[in-house]
Image: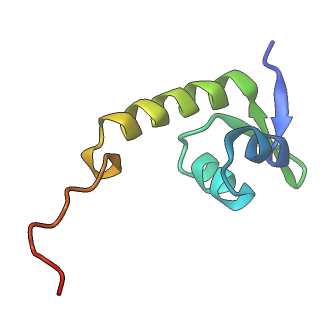
Amino acid sequence: MPDWISVQEAAELSGYHPEQIRRLIRQGRIKAERKGAMFWIDHEALRAFLQTAEKARASDKRYGPRPRSKRRRT
C-alpha cells in the first residue's frame, strides 16, 4: 500500500517549488492521484524520481565547475 503525501510535503522534502511538483505530476514524471482538488503523491515514487534526477544532474556537464576563461581581464 503506497504512503501518500501532499504536494506541500513533497515540496518540503525535495526542495522544489509546489508548482514545479504539480508540473512534474501533470507530465507523468511523478506518480500521483487526484483526490478532490488535491494531488496526493506516492512517497516512494517521489524518492525514485529524486534519485533519477540527482543521477542525471551529476552526469550533466553543465552542472560541473565552469572552465576559467583564458582571456585576461584588464
Residue at 61% x, 56% y is: 23
Please report the residue visible at 76 percent of the width from the left and 41 percent of the height from the top.
10
Is 69 or 12 nearer to us in this picture?
69
- Report whether 74 appears left or right of 35: left
How far across and down, in percent of the image, does residue 17 sit?
A: 70, 57
Q: Residue furthest top?
A: 1
Q: Residue at x 25, y 45 (%)?
A: 61
1 versus 63 height, above or below: above
Query: Percent x, y for residue 50?
Result: 57, 33
Find the residue positioned furthest to the front. 74
Comparing 63 with 2, the one in front is 63
**In the rendered image, which quarter contains the N terminus?**
top right
How many numbered marks have been drawn onto this rendered protein structure?
Answer: 0
Which residue is at the far left? 70
Outermost residue, right side: 36
Please tell me whether residue 50 is drawn above or below residue 27 in the rendered image. above
Query: What colouring style does the render use?
Result: rainbow
Quarter of the picture containing the C terminus is: bottom left
Foreground of the two, 11 or 35: 11
Residue at left 83%, top 49%? 8
The x and y percentages for residue 58 are 37, 35
Q: Position of residue 37 (x, y in %)?
A: 88, 55
